[in-house]
Image: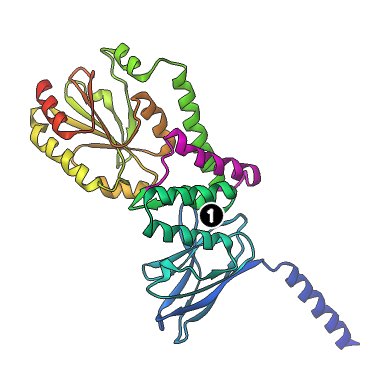
């Protein structure tokens, strides 16, 4: 009798524990030529990356990694040292990967996750195809299923260090809108949905407000003696206001640290600054960046004023100065009047001398 009661009690406990068990997903497979190295499964969330499981690879390179299933579809990655393979996890999947250590980022042998395979194919296209061919491939992914992780990945694809879609370009923004709208329908509470949807919405609202005015060029002309002001945070978090520089000749720079030629571009600015700063030239750089950490590293040793604007806060400022592409430069005289728009440093240099 006692044994029967114990058996029943054990069964009840087992059932209760089983009911509370968290659903998981697994990533398994083989990584050749990596014996003795640590393999990490990491969750690449919107704001941080964290390790969710790991193992030490043996001679045959087989592995099984497991983690709690995400509440919403999200991105993960397999990593060995600095080599990594992005993965898309929709639910309680069982993803299989077969690769080698040195080819981990280029792996195409992926089973159990259609989105992960599409992402891998896009990366392969980025390595071998032209920018337009990559845009076509990414567009096909987005149009086919805008609510998928592969579509979200395609929207933020890079080639040569540059995003292939420009959210400030009306035609390109349709790609962002398609994904943002679809995600908002199916997953409105998802953090990635909120950020992307609000980003697109704010830019569209800013554009609509500008369309109710005359063109920005007319607005600048009518402003005459009044500066179109900007107040944004610098790398220390202090707010820097453009109008405080009245009395100086100012190069107003709109650019991004994500540009392929960012180092060379800042070298050109530094030459202007070193040449004319003591005669009354100041530079006010507005950097439009998604990656704030990258921007902070880029501007760390720059001697002029550098301020940060993420895509949300940048839209009204870019509209205010009718900035159509990055980089764009303006020259302001000592009264704060806009005297010219430039993409050529040689002409800018010549005009600076006129107003010093």
Characterize the local packing of mark 1: few (<14), some (14-19) or many (20 or more) Cα atoms within 10 angstroms: many
Picture coordinates of residue 52, whole percent (x, y):
52, 67
Residue closest to the far right: 1
Quarter of the image with the N terminus is bottom right
Residue 180 falls in image quadrant: top right
224 or 115: nearer the viewer: 115
Whether 179 is among the magenta residues is yes
Up the image or down, 40 lies above or below 231; here it is below
Picture coordinates of residue 164, whole percent (x, y):
40, 46
Quarter of the image with the C terminus is top left
Magenta stretch secondary structure, dominant:
helix
Q: How has the structure been colored for display?
A: rainbow
Q: Is residue 300 visible?
A: no
The residue beneath circle 1 is: 150
Residue 15 falls in image quadrant: bottom right
Picture coordinates of residue 111, whole percent (x, y):
57, 69
Up the image or down, 203 lies above or below 1; here it is above
Q: Specify start and end residues of the magenta stretch as a single range.
A: 163-191
At x 36%, y 29%, the residue is: 318
At x 59%, y 56%, the residue is: 73
Residue 238 falls in image quadrant: top left
Up the image or down, 334 lies above or below 317; here it is above
Helix, strand or loop status at disc 1: helix
118 or 35: nearer the viewer: 118
Q: On the picture, is 119 further left or further right than 89?
A: left
Q: On the picture, is 184 further left or further right than 215?
A: right
Whether 292 is among the magenta residues is no
288 or 158: nearer the viewer: 158
Q: Is residue 30 visible?
A: yes
Picture coordinates of residue 177, whole percent (x, y):
53, 39
């Amino acid at each position: 009798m006692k044994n029967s009661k114990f058996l029943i009690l054990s069964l009840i406990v087992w059932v209760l524990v089983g009911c509370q068990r968290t659903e998981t997903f697994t990533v398994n497979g083989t990584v050749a030529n990596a014996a003795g190295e640590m393999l990490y499964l990491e969750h690449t969330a919107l704001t941080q990356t964290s390790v969710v499981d790991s193992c030490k690879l043996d001679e045959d390179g087989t592995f099984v990694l497991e983690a709690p299933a995400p509440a919403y579809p999200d991105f993960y990655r397999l990593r060995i040292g600095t080599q990594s393979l992005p993965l898309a996890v929709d639910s309680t999947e069982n993803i299989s990967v077969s690769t080698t250590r040195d080819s981990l980022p280029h792996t195409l042998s992926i089973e159990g996750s259609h989105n992960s395979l599409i992402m891998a194919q896009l990366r392969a296209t980025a390595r071998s195809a032209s920018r337009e061919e990559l845009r076509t491939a990414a567009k096909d992914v987005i149009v086919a299923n805008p609510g998928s992780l592969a579509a979200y990945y395609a929207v933020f694809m890079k080639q040569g260090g540059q995003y292939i879609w420009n959210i400030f370009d009306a035609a390109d923004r349709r790609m962002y809108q398609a994904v943002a709208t679809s995600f908002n329908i199916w997953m409105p509470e998802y953090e990635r949905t909120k950020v992307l949807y609000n980003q697109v919405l704010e830019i569209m609202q800013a554009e609509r407000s500008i369309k109710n005015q005359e063109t920005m060029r007319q607005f600048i002309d009518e402003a005459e003696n009044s500066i179109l002001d900007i107040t944004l945070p610098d790398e220390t978090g202090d707010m820097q206001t453009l109008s405080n520089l009245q009395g100086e000749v100012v190069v107003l720079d709109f650019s991004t640290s994500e540009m392929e030629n960012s180092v060379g571009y800042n070298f050109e600015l530094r030459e202007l600054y070193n040449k004319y700063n003591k005669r009354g030239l100041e530079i006010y750089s507005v950097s439009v960046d998604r990656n704030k950490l990258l921007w902070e590293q880029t501007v760390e040793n720059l001697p002029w004023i550098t301020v940060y604007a993420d895509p949300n806060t940048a839209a009204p400022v870019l509209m205010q100065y009718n900035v159509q592409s990055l980089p764009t430069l303006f020259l302001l005289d000592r009264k704060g009047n806009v005297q010219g728009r430039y993409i050529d440093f040689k002409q800018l240099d010549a005009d600076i001398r006129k107003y010093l």
